[in-house]
Amino acid sequence: MPAVLRHRVFNQSPFLFSIIQAAGWPIWPLLICSVVALALVIERFVSLRTARIAPVKLLDEVLSVTRQSLPGPDVVTKLAASSELGSVLAAGLRAVMGDPRIQEGALRQAFEIAGRGTVHRLERYLNTLGTIAAAAPLLGLLGTVIGMIEIFGSQPPTGGSNPALLAHGISVALYNTAFGLIIAIPALMFYRYFRRLVDEYALGMEMAAERMVPHLMRFAVRPAA
């Protein structure tokens, strides 16, 4: 878009829309990144709630229910569907119920496999959010470079350019860099926050599994000496 036309759009349009129009086509990938990042942040906030991942009293309730005997299959199924921690605990219960002679190592392996699958689900979309945080500044810089090329490429070779118009064109080209940073900084902060949250959930599930192993091994049939 020529600098004169950009200047007119900037003066005649609403401020935000004028920025988008003046910055040119490189700002559209940034707008898409901003929408995707916002959607991912909202989705992760909803999905990583404590009530859906690791209810506070769930482990104590499972230990209480299984103090005397193992629960029925329907109870284990409801436990697995209740939360992510419930699915990990249910995996250990199913391992003991499926093999009464299970060894401690095999039970730990069952918990570990279930825990890996759970952590993988908790990390869903985090790589996308981290990619946006890393790529947004680069996309903004690319838009600025393209804008600068257009500005200096449109200048007459005789050197009779308007300094005020040139300064305005440079400021418009910098919109892309500024918008890229505006997207990248919150995206990076939320990415780090969700990563720490997932690590805390993973540690809590590991500790819960450690408590469940000796508790469930009481129901394993010992081989005769």
Image (cartoon, helix red, strand yellow):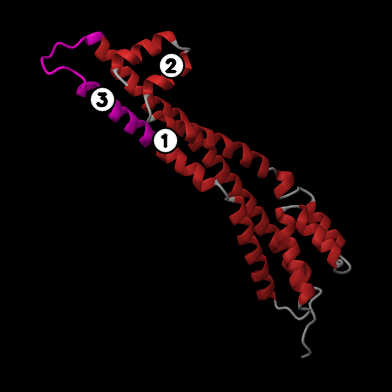
Q: Nearer the viewer, residue 125 or 15?
A: 15
In this view, 24 is above or below 41: above
Count of labels in the image: 3
| Mark 3: few/some/many CA within 10 Å (<14, 14-19, 20+) | some
- In the image, taking residue 164 as reference, residue 10 lies left or right, namely right
Q: Nearer the viewer, residue 39 or 45?
A: 39
The type of residue carrying mark 1 is: Ala
The image shows residue 64 at horizontal and vertical percentages of 86, 59
Residue at figure coordinates x 76%, y 59% from the top left: 80
Which numbered disc flags the more N-terminal residue, 3 or 1? 1
In the rendered image, the vertical position of residue 152 relative to residue 200, given as above or below: above
Residue at 70% in and 54% down: 84
Residue identifier under label 1: 136
| Residue segment shown in magenta | 136-164
Name the outermost residue toward the bottom.
225
Q: CA distance from mark 3 to mark 2?
A: 18 Å
Q: Which residue is mark 3?
A: 150
Residue 185 visible in the shown view:
no
* Image mark for residue 18: 2
Q: Position of residue 28 (x, y in %)?
A: 43, 31
Quarter of the rendering containing residue 111:
bottom right
Q: Quadrant of residue 38?
A: top right
The reply to whether dot 2 and dot 1 touch (C-beta < 8 Å) is no
- Crowd tier of the residue under label 1, counting other residues whose Cα lies within 10 Å: few below 14, some 14–19, many 20 or above: many
Q: Residue furthest left?
A: 158
Residue mark closest to the camera, 3 vs 1: 3
Residue at 20 percent of width and 24 percent of height: 153
